[in-house]
Amino acid sequence: MLFGATAALLDTTIISVALDQLGQAFTAPVSTVQWVSTAYLLAMALIIPLTGWCVDRFGAKATWLCTLALFVAGSMLCAAAWSAESLIVFRVVQGLGAGMILPLTQVILAQAAGSRRFGRVMALVAIPGNLVPIVGPVLGGLMLNALPWRWIFLINVPVCVIAFVLAWWKLPADPPQGRPPLDVLGLAVLSPAVVAIVYGLSRAGAESSFAAVNVLAPIAIGLALLTVFATHALHTSKTPIIDLRLFRHRSFSASAALMFLSGAALYGPMFLLPLYYQQARGFDALTTGLTLAPQGIGTALALAVVGPLADRIGARPLVALGALTTTAGTLAYTQLPSGPDDVLLIASLALRGIGLGAVGIPTMAAAYHQLPHSAIPRATSATNVIQRVGASFGTALVAVILQQQINDQASGGASPEILTHAFANTFWWTVGFAVLFLPLAMFLPRRSR
């Protein structure tokens, strides 16, 4: 399962260091090339709500194998692209395959584990989700230094072939749960709503403003569609594509809110940190990636111990401790103008990684607390949609704030000193994300069983 999940998530981050080279290869402007990343993310957001229905209708194993096959096909098409436009189209195909991979990983492992082992299993699921955003830019820099750009897509093929063969061989066959009717109206409303919101938030980062028409319009459309979906989901006689009645469970509602914040707390700083080291410190892409590695190391340390602890003592104390640790690990970056030692910054990143791991793993496990086995697929779809919107929101918010900080302080060109102050002020907002973990932790169960 983790082979497939790693490949899909790697493609969301490895592309970030390749956009400049892709622009040169296709003689395309940045405004066009950025759609290579945006189209992939929007396609992922579009397909996630279908996860629960596909598992019920076709079975988890069959859905997993088809999803992997579509992702590999999209990767090969991307590697064969002859223009920026063709690459963008093929990235949509690839994103449609990738969108279900991580939710399916959670569904299959959570159903197999049972409530007594949710924490340990979510620690496994968290490995690609927490480490890939750190490892991706490093691997991307290494590959682009030695190989043509097409290999950033071809690298997926052998990894997914291994995942496909292992799943075909070892994954237990699971019969479909009858022929549940597809909530066509819900899908027709929810998927465009999520895409519109994610698109609007991505444009907010690009426009450096939430007030632009091409930011407000898609977000407003998305929120209006969400309202329509909520009304439909609460009154339909069918099982909705995402069952809002799950939010009646306090632990699920608290977990969903924490998933939103954890998406913002992980991806917001992961937008800021590379820019700080490249623009204010002058590091190249590879050095920047290596500098960020301690956060991944910290997360790896957390993964080793937090999963079993979540099963033993429950999510609440671990998330509370993780909130304090993440906050402490971010504070050093609010003091950048005073010139904190690089050793302190590196140690802070490791501490951030530990804190984010201590929040993310118990939160995912708590989402399934007291839910019936049959509700796990749709609960997973809901939390993944929420986390993706949170990641987009966090990235857009810090991008807008950073640009405003630079504009406020720079009368001419932005010097390294001005950039340092702008980044430090923006990092205070990421501290706020971490602080908000604490009150939400109080609504999580003390024990996971």
Image (tube, rainbow, N blue to C red):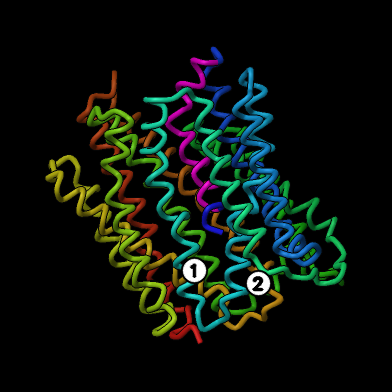
Which residue is more in the foreground, 79 or 423?
A: 79
Does 113 sit left or right of 276 as displayed?
Answer: right
Contact, CB < 8 Å: mark 2 with mark 1? no
Q: Residues within 10 Å of mark 2 (few under 14, many from 20)?
A: some
Residue 356 seen anywhere in this rendered image of the structure:
yes
Does the magenta segment cover residue 49? no
Mark 2–mark 1 Cα distance, whole angstroms, equals 13 Å
Q: Nearer the viewer, residue 122 or 444?
A: 122
Kindly identify which numbered label has been placed on residue 77.
Answer: none
Residue 43, compared with residue 305, is above or below; it is above
Q: Position of residue 105 (x, y in %)?
A: 59, 61
* Residue shown at 67% from the left, 31% from the top: 90
Q: Residue at x 51, y 69 (%)?
A: 364
Which residue has dot 1 on it?
A: 122
Q: Could you tell me if residue 389 is visible in this image?
A: no
**Residue 25 on image: x %, y %:** 52, 16
Residue corresponding to mark 2: 376
Is residue 134 shown above or below 408?
Answer: below
Q: Position of residue 379 (x, y in %)?
A: 64, 68
Q: Residue at x 34, y 34 (%)?
A: 275
- Residue 439's place in the image compared with 45, above or below, is below
Say which element carries label 2: helix
Q: Please give the range of residues in magenta.
A: 5-25
In front of the other: 250 or 122: 122
Q: What kind of residue is marked 1?
A: Met
